[in-house]
Amino acid sequence: MPVLDYPTHTILITGASSGIGATFARSLASRGANLVLVARRGDRLDALATELTQAHGVTVTAITQDLGSPSVGVELAAAVAAAGLHVTGIINNAGFGTFGDFVKEDPDRLAQEIAVDISAPVHISSAFLPDMVKAGTGFLINVASMAAYTPTPRMAVYGAAKAFVLSFTESLWAETRASGVTIFAVSPGATSTEFNAVVGTDDATAGARMRTPDDVVATALAHLDRRNPGPSVIDGSSNRVGANIGRVMSRRGTVTMMHRLTDPARRNRTAAAR
């Protein structure tokens, strides 16, 4: 039985135009929650808002927003206030990765990656969390990644960004534990979304077995519905096992192993041998 009374909540979801974000939106709307959907692709947001309103009779507000903006938290808070809404839940889901040796990457693209993957969750949390703590209710879910648990050669910035998100969120959990606000990070592994298409190569997930956005959202919402949820949750039993590798191997051994796993030549050799 869910702990939250979902129809009383208005939940803001970033990166809601596809993948895990859109699945969060559909799952929460089916539970009766009102939604604020945020992404760059306004046409997709509008279509999803119409779908969910017609299917579930909830209020869905679409906000087209560049999440790489340095003032994204202030801008979103202003847009929410202008719409006459009071947000009681946040899901910082938006993010993207890059793949390749760091020295060959486009600095502007890396700066955008840092802005969306690190700065946006911080600024959005800062904009909305104080009011939740003051009210003594609400929740914040930040989407991290299995990349948070080990160094990630060829995705150095993405892995470090997700490690930041995981550490940041777990710290917030401890700071607000007595406030009545629920905070945690959910860490998916390889998931069948547009992630690889945005990165530009399937090498980004190193041939890993894919889980689905439905799997990830089910894990997150089951954790949210717990009476005393912990600071983080990993989606998938094999991913939970994998997260422990770094605890038993040396840092040198772990990063060397990850360098081999993300080597495109290794994947090509494996495919050729089949």
Image (spheres, grey):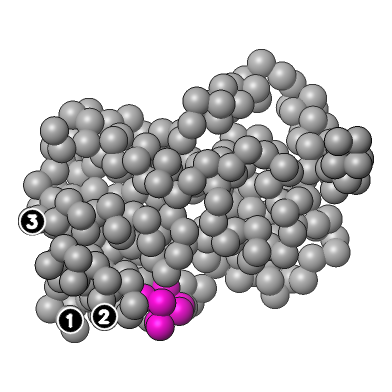
| Pair 2/3: label in front | 3
Quadrant including the N terminus: top left
In the displayed structure image, the side of residue 97 where residue 56 appears, left or right: left
Please tell me which of labels 3 and 1 falls first in the chain: 3
Residue drawn at (76%, 51%), measured in percent from left and top?
Answer: 203
Residue drawn at (34%, 54%), measured in percent from left and top?
Answer: 24
Q: Residue furthest front?
A: 274
Q: Which residues are magenta?
A: 39-45
Q: Amino acid at mark 1?
A: Ala
Give the SS element for disc 1. loop
> Where 121 falls versus 190 (above or below)?
below
Residue 194 placed where, x, y %? Answer: 57, 61
Callout 2–callout 1 Cβ contact below 8 Å: yes
Residue 2 placed where, x, y %? Answer: 15, 37
Residue drawn at (83%, 55%), measured in percent from left and top?
Answer: 101
Query: Rounded to the nearest whole Å, what is the CA distance between mark 2 and mark 3?
Result: 20 Å
Q: Residues within 10 Å of mark 3 (few under 14, many from 20)?
A: few
Q: How many marks?
A: 3
Quarter of the image for residue 10 reads bottom left
Q: Which residue is mark 2?
A: 79
> Where 186 falls versus 203 (above or below)?
above
| Pair 3/1: label in front | 3
Residue 72 in view here:
no
State the mark number for residue 8.
3
**159 within the magenta span:** no
Give the SS element for disc 2. helix
In the displayed structure image, the side of residue 256 where residue 81 appears, left or right: left
Q: Which residue is mark 1?
A: 83
